[in-house]
Image: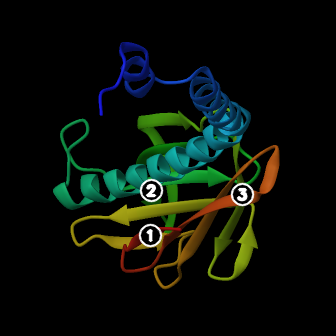
């Protein structure tokens, strides 16, 4: 059976209805992505800020292990200082006076969290605290959390506009740093 030229053209192309259906599906998917983008961006900002904070705690620990010198000699310790309800934290060299750690201005950096991300809660063990100092004393390093070498800490950061979305950073007395 022979087919005419007109029948062959029908078999080789798309109909206008098929093209309209494809365009409608692409439009719906695009609308869904655009609607959910701001929420996804905030969640990614939260995850990036928590990862950066955990990396900075690890970097401070590495500086203590390697005993990097400042002004010709290594400091007594390297640490990180956090405050509750803050948008930033500080990393610096620490000195020990009468058994208590205090930050020096020898090497100090203030790190800002991403926009809309805030430190919401600090805990030493299971007790909430307004400030948290995590200091690594060379060369082992010994971990000091608010002047105690036998506790652990939890740092919780959250999206300011959505307080239920949080990330937690855990640091224990052995120096293990974990995020969740």
Give residue 135's position: percent from left, percent from top: 44, 62
Q: Single out the mark in the foreground, 1 or 3.
A: 3
Q: Quadrant of residue 34?
A: top right
Q: Are marks 2 and 3 in contact (CB under 8 Å)?
A: no
Q: Quadrant of residue 165?
A: bottom right
Residue at point 73%, 54% (across, down):
84
Above or below — where is 129 with respect to 104?
Answer: below
Q: Earlier in the sequence, mark 2 or mark 3?
A: 2
Whole-angstrom CA distance, mark 1 to mark 3, is: 18 Å
The secondary structure type at the circle numbered 1 is strand
Given the current orientation, which residue lies at the most extreme top position?
Answer: 5
Q: Single out the mark in the foreground, 2 or 3.
A: 3
Q: Earlier in the sequence, mark 1 or mark 3?
A: 3
The numbered disc on residue 120 is none
Q: Nearer the viewer, residue 74 or 140?
A: 140
Q: Nearer the viewer, residue 10 or 59?
A: 10
The secondary structure type at the circle numbered 3 is strand
Can residue 165 be spotted in the picture?
Answer: yes
Reading the image, the residue beneath label 3 is 165
Can residue 116 be spotted in the picture?
Answer: no
Whole-angstrom CA distance, mark 2 to mark 1, is: 7 Å
Q: In the drawing, does residue 30 fall left or right of residue 171?
A: right
Reading the image, the residue beneath label 2 is 54
Q: Are marks 2 and 1 in contact (CB under 8 Å)?
A: yes
Residue at point 46%, 52% (across, down):
51
Whole-angstrom CA distance, mark 2 to mark 3, is: 18 Å
Reading the image, the residue beneath label 1 is 178
Residue at point 24%, 35% (across, down):
71
Q: Within 10 angstroms of label 1, few (less than 14), some, or many (20 or more) residues?
A: few
The secondary structure type at the circle numbered 2 is helix
């Amino acid at each position: 059976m022979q087919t005419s030229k007109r029948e062959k053209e029908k078999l080789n192309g798309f109909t206008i209805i098929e093209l309209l259906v494809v365009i409608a599906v692409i439009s719906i998917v695009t609308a869904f992505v655009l609607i959910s983008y701001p929420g996804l961006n905030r969640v990614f900002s939260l995850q990036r800020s928590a990862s950066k904070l955990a990396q900075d705690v690890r970097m401070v620990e590495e500086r203590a292990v390697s005993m990097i010198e400042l002004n010709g000699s290594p400091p007594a310790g390297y640490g990180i200082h956090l405050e509750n309800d803050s948008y930033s934290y500080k990393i610096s060299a620490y000195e020990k006076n009468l058994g208590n750690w205090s930050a020096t201005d020898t090497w100090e950096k203030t790190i800002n969290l991403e926009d809309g991300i805030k430190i919401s809660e600090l805990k030493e063990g299971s007790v909430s605290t307004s400030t948290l100092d995590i200091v690594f004393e060379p060369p082992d390093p010994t971990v000091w959390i608010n002047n105690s070498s036998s506790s652990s800490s939890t740092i919780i950061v959250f999206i300011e506009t959505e307080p239920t979305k949080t990330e937690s950073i855990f640091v224990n007395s052995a120096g293990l740093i974990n995020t969740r």
